[in-house]
Image (cartoon, rainbow, N blue to C red):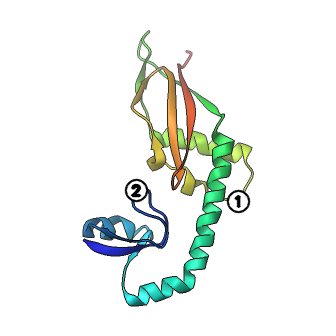
């Protein structure tokens, strides 16, 4: 286990500025390359204390943006028509998280005119849904930032020929 200093809040690990012990592989392969953390030493701690205010401001800004996105997306339901196999409701292929995130991003870009990095808040990795391979209504959970998440509805229907 190695100690790292979190530069951003990481779900189920800690908030910004926390010193946590993690597996070396997790730190070297994920946290450090994604700039979520750095390995702790005296020099890093001193530098972080000087810049802590900047990191906290960025964290608060992202939190505020995530709350506004949550409010904007809370009452939205999406519809998607896909090709089905024969007369059944089974889809020809599954609906991927990428398709869902692209649909959400398109909706946000059309309805919310702002200069925020949407891809930071809405990405396929942040969507929690089961396998969608039949027509019907599905609940989709999107983890926007930290512990802020929103649940939306996706209606999947058969594509008319």
Asked whether 89 or 86 is in front, the reply is 89
Can residue 107 be seen in the rendering of this structure? no
Left or right of 149: which side holds 112? right
Judging from the image, what secondary structure is the residue with disc 1 in? loop
Question: Quarter of the image containing the C terminus?
Answer: top right
Q: What element does badge 2 sit on?
A: loop
Residue linked to disc 2 = 12
Disc 1: which residue: 115
Image quadrant in which the N terminus is located: bottom left
Q: Residues within 10 Å of mark 1 (few under 14, many from 20)?
A: few
Mark seen at residue 18: none
Q: Which picture quadrant has residue 11?
A: bottom left
Q: Is residue 59 visible?
A: yes
Q: State which quadrant residue 129 falls in.
A: top left
Residue 147 x/y as whole percent = 51, 52
| Residue occupying image coordinates x 64% and y 51% | 67
- In the rendered view, would you say 54 is above or below 66? below
| Residue toward you, 103 or 25 | 25
Residue 133, position in %: x, y? Answer: 41, 25
Residue drawn where x is 66% and y is 58% of the image: 64
Residue 79: x percent and y percent?
59, 27
Q: Count residues near mark 2 (Cα–Cα under 10 Å), then give few for <14, some for 14-19, many for 20+.
A: few
| Residue at 61% over, 46% down | 105
Callout 1 touching callout 2 (CB < 8 Å): no
Q: Position of residue 68 (x, y in %)?
A: 68, 50
In screen coordinates, is 125 left or right of 57? left
Residue at 68 percent across and 47 percent down: it is 109
């Amino acid at each position: 286990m190695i100690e790292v200093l979190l530069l951003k809040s990481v779900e189920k690990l800690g908030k910004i500025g926390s010193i946590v012990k993690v597996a070396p592989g997790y730190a070297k392969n994920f946290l450090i390359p994604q700039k979520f953390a750095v390995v702790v030493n005296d020099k890093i701690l001193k530098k972080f204390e000087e810049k802590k205010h900047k990191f906290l401001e960025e964290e608060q800004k992202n939190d505020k943006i995530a709350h506004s996105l949550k409010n904007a997306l809370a009452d939205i339901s999406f519809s998607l028509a896909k090709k089905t196999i024969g007369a059944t409701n089974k889809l020809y292929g599954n609906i991927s998280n990428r398709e869902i995130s692209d649909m959400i991003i398109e909706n946000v870009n059309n309805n919310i005119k702002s200069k925020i990095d949407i891809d930071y808040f809405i990405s396929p990795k942040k969507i929690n849904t089961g396998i969608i391979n039949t027509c019907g209504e599905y609940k989709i959970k999107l983890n926007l930032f930290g512990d802020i998440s929103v649940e939306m509805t996706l209606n999947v229907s058969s594509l008319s020929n």
